[in-house]
Image: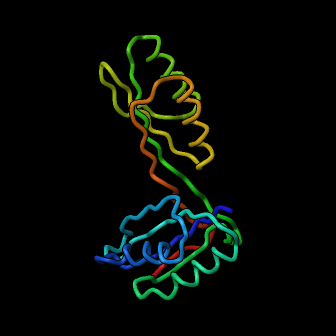
Amino acid sequence: MRHVISILIENEAGALSRVVGLFSQRGYNIESLTVAPTDDPTLSRCTILTTGDSDEAEQITKQLHKLVCILRVSALNEEKNGSQERELVLIKLPTPNRNVREDIKSLSDIFGAKIIDVSPETYTLQYVGSSEEVDTFCETVFKMSDVLEVVRSGVLGIARGNHYMHS
């Protein structure tokens, strides 16, 4: 089962290493990891996507609470009102001729993707959606064209409604 864990962590050297070490020591895999500073430069927001049964997810959450550098932990898929999740993908495609460029432009319009870089030989597309939407977009692009490069951000998540993480 898929679990999205959101963490408010101190923005200091070694803090992220302790979180990743906790997963490693217990044999849990991190499917994706996204970290960035918050509006408070002393704190970072970390979103981790992992898989396992509900007991494993509960154990991970309990162990994270014990780390000194962690201020808050939230299992987003367990939030009462649910959560919003998004992922970003950048895909670089070859554009050898006008027909390919038109096909890529048409596909971008259909999915609501953006062409963020244009050169005589390549287009770079940006698409934002749920993980499932990003998977579908990627599969469609892979069937349509050769792909030169793909970069995915990993899952970002936030609770719906009045629920929020604060220090």
**Quick check: 108 above or below 76?**
above
Q: In the current view of this chain or complex, which residue is farthest to the top?
A: 98
**Quick check: 20 above or below 2?**
below
Instruction: Examine the image and state in which quarter residue 68 appears.
Output: bottom left
Count of numbered badges drawn on the protein = 0
**Viewport quadrant of the C terminus:** bottom left
Name the residue: 43% across, 33% down: 125
Instruction: Examine the image and state in which quarter residue 91 appears.
Output: top left
Instruction: Examine the image and state in which quarter residue 94 appears.
Output: top left
Q: Position of residue 96 (x, y in %)?
A: 38, 14
Camera-side residue: 128 or 50?
A: 50
**Viewport quadrant of the N terminus:** bottom right
- Residue 63 is left or right of residue 101, and the answer is right
Name the residue: 36% across, 78% down: 15
Camera-side residue: 87 or 30?
A: 30
Q: Position of residue 57 (x, y in %)?
A: 63, 74
Name the residue: 52% across, 85% down: 65
Name the residue: 61% across, 68% down: 76
Looking at the image, what colour scheme do you see? rainbow
Q: Position of residue 134 (x, y in %)?
A: 56, 43
**Quick check: 125 above or below 36?**
above
Q: Position of residue 78 (x, y in %)?
A: 68, 71
Camera-side residue: 26 or 45?
A: 26
